[in-house]
Amino acid sequence: MIAIKNVSKHYGSFQVLSECSTQVAKGEVIVVCGPSGSGKSTLIKCVNGLEPFQSGEIIVNGISVGDPKTNLPKLRAHVGMVFQNFELFPHMSVTDNLALAQVKVLGRSREEAVQRGHQLLERVGLLAQAEKFPGQLSGGQQQRVAIARALSMDPICMLFDEPTSALDPEMVKEVLDVMVGLAQEGMTMMVVTHEMGFARRVAHRVIFMDQGRIVEDAPKEDFFGAPRSERAQLFLSKILQH
Amino acid sequence: MGELDWTSIPGALPFLWAGMVTTLEITLLAVLVGIVWGTLLAIMRMSGVKLLSWFAAGYVNLFRSIPLVMVLLWFFLIVPALLESLFNTPRSADTRLSSAMVAFALFEAAYYSEIIRAGIQSVAKGQLGAASALGLTYAQAMTMVILPQAFRNMVPLLLTQGIILFQDTSLVYVSSLADFFGAAYKVGDRDGRLVEMLLFAGAVYFLICFSASLLVRRFQKKVAT
Amino acid sequence: MGYHWNWGVFASPVPSGETSYLGWMISGFETTLALSLSAWLIALVIGSGMGVLRTVPNRWLAGLAAAYVELFRNIPLLVQLFIWYFVLPELLPAGLGDAYKGTNPLLQQFVAAMVCLGLFTGARVCEQVRSGINSLPRGQKYAGLALGLTLPQTYRYALLPMAFRIIVPPLTSEFLNIFKNSAVASTIGLLELAAQGRQLVDYTAQPYESFIAVTLTFMALNAIVMSLMHLLEARTRVPGSMGT
């Protein structure tokens, strides 16, 4: 589904990503973790072309992201993305947030889009908030709406960029529950997160990044059993101390 | 139209230079008086004394709601008549330059006072409490703690307003005072080379203002870091 | 000072007898309104377009917009007006220039003043639009793109609606400025409000009444525009944002 081959990226002389390679199979859930500044957010933004990269190749569903001829909007329409700060459009009601791209990108009628949107709102438990504006919702509710918004495009895979790090602790669970549900249904997911409990529950593989490199890429059991690199061990022990 | 002909410019340079001196005189005086009077207005506006803050608010709103051209016309009309009745100055005396200076200084003070008020308020929020906790009086806190910081932050804005003022002084044209623009217009009109002189004047203003705003931006970056 | 106040002057007929001095003032007011509103339209359209260009990931387009701003911000309004009015018709190709100079001089004054004020103010609007867009979180653009919207669609539906809401207050002061700056058009002979006021002084020897009337009209205009913009600000406020 997603293949990342030798991807490198630099800003001037600062190397953000170097020679990153991995792949995500259909139905697989991959957790990407690592200290801040390790390049994990940048890597996930490269997957749908939000961040350009200088060398290497990323293939999503058979289409090369870095190819200048690729129709990026078309590709992105099928790759859902959830952001750290939700990024709902504040001037639109929840319903309109969900309907906008369905109408403008997929060409659905407004009725169809609203109906699909409301189905997904019900699924994340927020149908009652459909006519509210993002600013009137809690952080956890906003993030659930953002997940529903991404799902409304019927994506073939989902990218999560630290979906719970901007949330108050008591709201993390409601968002993770939605994500666990998705994983259990077989959605292909690439998740940048520090929530190791989530990784233990649903991840198939864990990728550990440090200083722009993929240091470890192992099945969940191996990663939590005995991470091979010292840095991953150190990282895990720090995370667990929280 | 025929070819552009720039030959009337070299001969007119001394006259244009004299005009530029007038422009700079008006600008500098208006900046200095405007900042001093604007600071006083800002302090009056923020003072607890109702009468003073009403006066300052009324003054600022009045000047900010009428066109500069109108203010200049008022001053060219009223100041000479007032001077005449107060000091018995002879009618023939040319008071246009002093009228212009007074008009610009009073007008700009309204704009400066708003910049300064915003600057003081942004510093005062936290610092006023800290200063009074140390036992400083309001006046001491203002002069020793708040104003020095506020002015340092405001310098770029005050300078930018100065550049705008420098451009606005060209409006003394309405009194046919020979500032830089007035001088350029007069030469162009006299030699039948208005097109060239207007383009020349535009280019000179652009060079001066553009370089000045580049300097302000560089200064701003330096202050910010 | 022995000044003889006479507010009745506005009711007396002008020398040609076809209207009263009040009629002159009203026609000046109408010209000021027409000039300011049409110039504001130009400023909004050009300023928004250029403001967007300043933020797009294309060096040439962003540079073009930056050059526009610098050019129109660093030359005095009066000089720009004289260049539009006196210089530009001369620089047009001969046939076109002569045709333009053959049109109604009043129209020429109005067009020059409108274009001049519009582009002058457009440069300021451009900077406001740019700072409005730049003040939005970077993620908003990402979110629009990640949904499959094109860059123009992302601007149209996600970025600009918020950016414009944010910049209503600074745009209000630019809108007010355009009314005030329109008085500069009196220097090329356009009979807007300030010019009519000056004409009244020449004809009636009642300078104070005339100037007070013009000044008060500008102040009233200022107050009306300000309250209209406050209304707009309240109408477009996003539920759940600060202040609600």
Image: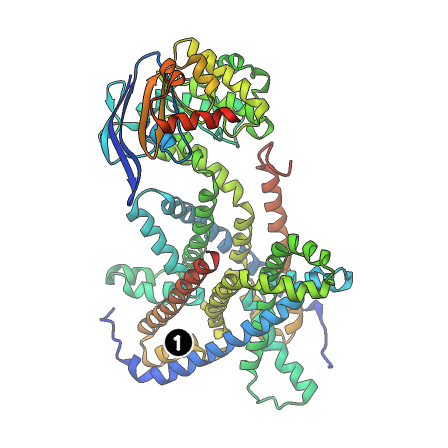
Q: Is residue C10 visible?
A: no
In the displayed structure image, the side of residue C11 where residue C27 appears, left or right = left
In the rendered structure, which amino acid carries the disc numbered 1? Tyr
User: Residue A152 at x, y = what percent?
Assistant: 43, 17
| Viewer-closest of B62 and C92 | B62
Packing grade of label 1 (10 A; few <14, some 14-19, many >=20) is many
| Viewer-closest of B149 and B52 | B149
Image height of A51 relative to B116, above or below: above
Label 1 secondary element: helix
* Identity of the residue furthest to the top in this view: A185
Q: Is residue A228 visible?
A: yes
At x 62% / y 67%, what residue is drawn?
A: B38
In the displayed structure image, the side of residue C10 where residue B184 appears, left or right = left
* Identity of the residue furthest to the right in this view: B50
Image height of B118 relative to B96, above or below: above
Image height of C191 relative to A11, above or below: below
In the displayed structure image, the side of residue A78 where residue A55 appears, left or right = left
* Tag 1 residue: B185
| Viewer-closest of C181 and B17 | B17
User: Residue B72 at x, y = what percent?
Assistant: 56, 72
Examine the image and state in which quarter residue A192 appears: top left
Judging from the image, mark 1 belongs to the subunit labelled B
On-image quarter of the C terminus of chain C: top right
User: Residue A158 at x, y = what percent?
Assistant: 39, 19
